[in-house]
């Protein structure tokens, strides 16, 4: 029965995480908290290992759709690596109460930000230094952003994602869409590729530190891989506004539930 439950949780996490570009940690962490009550460092390490599998699956699916901006993804992913390592190391010092509080506040603030700004045009917070040109569903899209700002956001995201065991997309996707002018579908797909880089590095660090509960990872990861494939296909058919609204509403409910635990 436990194996079936873990598989279903993993599938849901992979499906939802891939659709909105978060990686699924925002689903896995609450379930692990409510069902297993494991300490924060094990929550982070176990979730990060599942995210690694989920992001591999989602990246493969999005790459087939040619929605990933690999050039930007490599830069942002590289910036997340040192943050991911630092976050895994600091996770040992995090108390359960502080873990819940930080986790809930981060995702709640991002969700409120998304819900309040859907009608405000996306714009670069700093003058653009990079211009990208891609094809999205047969249409050519051109967008520009400040690479230095993106690298700073990526480093901070890497630290927080590894510290808390979330994919980092809850920070990265809104920043890419609202502050760096990425089209929503490109941001979602590219976020999964970036999460692939950071989560696998974070997972290796967590394994070295003994933070991974392997019997939980196995069935969660199988479900997450399958869910990631399905989620990428569903996301390709959703309007950009629907993606962002789904992300925001999901995060509101999840953050409130965690902070009241």
Image: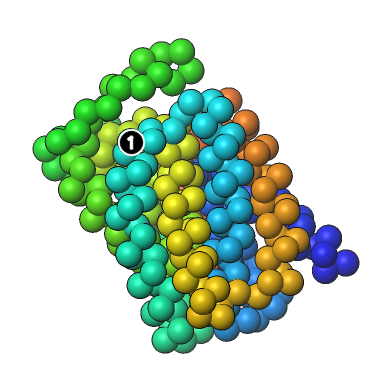
In the displayed structure, does residue 111 sit left or right of residue 242? left
In the displayed structure, does residue 220 sit left or right of residue 131? right
In the displayed structure, does residue 167 sit left or right of residue 85? right
Residue found farthest to the left:
127
What is the number of callouts on the image?
1
Residue 219 at what x, y percent from top left? 75, 61
Rendering quarter of residue 70 = top left
Residue found farthest to the top:
138
User: What residue did someone put label 1 on?
Assistant: 71
Looking at the rendered structure, the secondary structure element under dot 1 is helix
Near mark 1 (Cα within 10 A), the count class, few <14, some 14-19 or many ≥20, is few
* Quadrant showing the C terminus: bottom right
Q: Can residue 235 be seen?
A: yes
Q: Is residue 97 above or below residue 72?
A: below
Q: Nearer the viewer, residue 42 or 32?
A: 42
Q: Can residue 164 be seen?
A: no
Residue 148 at what x, y percent from top left? 18, 48
Residue 2 at what x, y percent from top left? 83, 69
Q: Is residue 201 above or below residue 172?
A: below
Q: Which residue lies at the image location 39% right of the left edge and 69% below the top edge?
A: 85
Q: Nearer the viewer, residue 178 or 202?
A: 202
Q: Which residue lies at the image location 48% right of the left edge and 45% below the top edge?
A: 192
Q: Nearer the viewer, residue 181 or 223?
A: 223
Q: How is the image coloured?
A: rainbow
* Quadrant showing the N terminus: bottom right
Q: Which residue lies at the image location 46% right of the left edge and 13% below the top edge?
A: 138
Q: Which residue lies at the image location 70% right of the left edge and 60% below the top edge?
A: 220
Residue 214 at what x, y percent from top left? 68, 72
């Amino acid at each position: 029965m436990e194996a079936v439950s873990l598989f279903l949780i993993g599938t849901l996490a992979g499906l939802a995480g891939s659709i909105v570009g978060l990686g699924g940690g925002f689903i896995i962490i609450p379930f692990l908290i409510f069902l297993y009550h494991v300490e924060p460092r094990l929550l982070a390490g176990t979730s990060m290992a599942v995210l690694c599998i989920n992001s591999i699956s989602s990246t493969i699916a999005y790459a087939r759709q040619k929605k990933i901006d690999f050039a930007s993804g490599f830069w942002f992913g590289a910036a997340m690596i040192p943050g991911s390592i630092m976050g895994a190391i600091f996770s040992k010092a995090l108390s359960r109460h502080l873990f819940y509080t930080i986790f809930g506040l981060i995702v709640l603030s991002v969700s409120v930000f998304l819900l309040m700004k859907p009608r405000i045009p996306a714009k670069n917070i700093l003058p653009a230094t990079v211009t990208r040109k891609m094809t999205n569903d047969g249409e050519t899209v051109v967008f520009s952003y400040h690479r230095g700002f993106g690298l700073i956001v990526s480093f901070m995201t890497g630290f927080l994602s590894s510290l808390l065991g979330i994919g980092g997309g809850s920070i990265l996707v809104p920043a890419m869409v609202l502050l760096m002018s990425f089209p929503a579908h490109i941001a979602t797909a590219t976020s999964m590729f970036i999460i692939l880089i950071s989560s696998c590095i974070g997972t290796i660090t967590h394994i070295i530190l003994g933070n991974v509960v392997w019997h939980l990872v196995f069935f969660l990861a199988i479900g997450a891989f399958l869910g990631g494939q399905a989620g990428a296909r569903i996301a390709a058919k959703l309007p950009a506004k629907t993606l962002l609204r789904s992300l925001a509403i999901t995060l509101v409910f999840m953050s409130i539930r965690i902070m009241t635990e």
